[in-house]
Amino acid sequence: AQHCIPSTQAQIFIDQLPAEFVRANEMLALLKMSPMQKPPLEIAKEFPKVGSATWTIGWAFGEILVVFHRYVAGRTGDDLVLDGPNLPGMSGGPVVNEAGQVVGINQASNVAASLACSQKEIREFLKLK
């Protein structure tokens, strides 16, 4: 998530490996890691259906890898609404479907639900068809 990047000039490290800032918009940031340690996840082409299972992944409080099972509760514009909250620090983590495809990126949360930008927004940002 773009709000996780302190500055385009900051030194950024992921798992103690350097990452280079490429670009950002108001929601997303693209970082480049070389060499990549793992292959990238596939970005889904379709919106998940309401009621479909997802998993939100992130580093809660910047320290603990957390995976939550969530269901798609609805949409607000191009954003996904998931049926439970995330913890602070999970922003920027993927939301994946049962096939392991990215359907969103964790953005915000309250006590009842969480919000993720959709795969449509990710594909547009990455200039994928």
Image (spheres, helix red, strand yellow):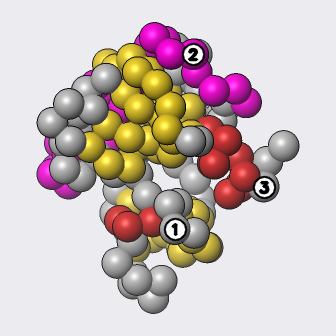
Residue drawn at 52 percent across, 20 percent down? 97
Would residue 12 appear left or right of 43 to someone viewing this image?
Answer: left
Query: Quick one: label 3 or label 2, which is nearer the N terminus?
Result: 2
- Label 3 neighbour load within 10 Å: few <14, some 14-19, many 20+: few
Q: Is mark 3 on a helix, strand or loop?
A: loop
Residue drawn at 31 percent across, 23 percent down? 83
Mark 2 → mark 1, Cα distance in angstroms: 26 Å
Query: Quick one: label 2 or label 1, which is nearer the N terminus?
Result: 1
- Label 1 neighbour load within 10 Å: few <14, some 14-19, many 20+: few
Residue drawn at 31 percent across, 37 percent down? 114
Q: Mark 3 points at which residue?
A: 127
Q: Can residue 66 be seen in this view?
A: no
Q: Is mark 2 on a helix, strand or loop?
A: loop
Q: Name the residue under label 1.
A: 26
Amino acid at circle 2: Lys
- Of the 4 image quadrants, the one containing the N terminus is bottom left
Mark 3 → mark 2, Cα distance in angstroms: 23 Å
